Amino acid sequence: MKSLKKFAFEKPVLFSVILILCSVGITFIPLNSFLFHSLNEQAAGYASGVVEQTLVSVLLIILLAKMQLLNQAGFRLKVKQLWIVWPMVLIAVLDALELFDGTVKIDTSSRSTIIMYILVYLSTGLFEETLCRGWVQTLFIQKWGNTKKGIYGSVILASLLFGMLHLIHFFMGQMTLLASVTQVIYATFIGVFMGACVLRNESIIPTIILHGLVDIAGSLNEIAVNGGIHKELMTISVSNAVESVALMSPLLIYGLFILRKTAGSERVQSE
C-alpha cells in the first residue's frame, strides 16, 4: 500500500489514467448474458452495469480510505452550500418535463426494466464522481497544492480526463467522431462545475446524487414507449454540436467562478 500511495502521489496523472482505464474496463465486462437470465435483454444490461459500477465504486472508496484520502475526496454528509448546485437541478427538471408535455411516455409494461434503469444511472453517478472527482481531482490537488493555480489546474485537468473518458463511445462504434468530441467538450464543462461544487460544498455527495438524477432525466427515451436502447451509430450535425457546446458553456463559466471563490479559502488551506 505504501508503494501504491507513493506512486499515486508522485505521478498522479499517470496513476489517474491507469485507474480510469482499469475502472472503466471492468464496467464493460458483459455479465448480462450469464447472470441475469430472468430479465429481458435491456434490464439485464442495466443490471450488469449496476453490479459492476457499484462494485468498482466501493473498491475505489475503500482504497481512498486506505490511503487516508476519504475526507479530502469529500465523502462526508455535511454540506456547506448546497444551493450552488442549482444549474444541475434545473437541467434535470427541464429534461424531466418531457414526461409532462407528452413528448415521452414511459413504457410501464416491464417494471424490472424501469427499476434497473434508475439504479444503473444512480450507480453511474456514484462511479463517475468517485473516480473523477473523488480520486483524480483529489490526487491532483494533493500534488499541486491548494493555491489558486493548483486548484484551477487540478479541477480543469481532472475534468478534461472525465471528458475524454467519453471517447470510449467512439472507439466502441457507438458514436461518430464529431458526436463523441462534442460529448467530450460538454462533459469537460460539466466536470469543471461538478469539481468546483465538490470543493465549495466540501462534500462529493450532492454531485453523486445530481449526476445520477441528470442521467436519469436525460435518458428517458430508453424506457419510453417505442423507445429502448438504440444500437445504431449516433450522429450529430455541426450546428447541433455547436449548439450543445454553447448550451453547456455557462456551466464552465459558473464553475470557474465558484473556483475563484473557493481557491485559497480557509477550507482549502487547512487540508
Image (cartoon, rainbow, N blue to C red):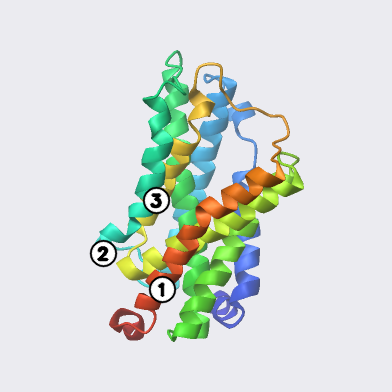
Residue at which label 1 appears: 259
Residue at which label 2 appears: 81
Residue at left offset 49%, top offset 77%: 152
**What is the three-letter code of the residue carrying label 2?**
Gln
Q: Is residue 25 above or below residue 215?
A: below
Q: Is residue 7 above or below residue 113?
A: below
Q: Secondary structure at mark 1?
A: helix
Q: Is residue 77 above or below residue 217?
A: below
Q: Earlier in the sequence, mark 1 or mark 2?
A: 2
**What is the three-letter code of the residue carrying label 1?**
Leu
Cβ atoms at labels 2 and 3 below 8 Å apart: no
Residue 69 in view here: no
Q: Secondary structure at mark 2?
A: loop
Q: Secondary structure at mark 3?
A: helix
Residue at which label 3 appears: 88
Q: Earlier in the sequence, mark 2 or mark 3?
A: 2
**What is the three-letter code of the residue carrying label 3?**
Met
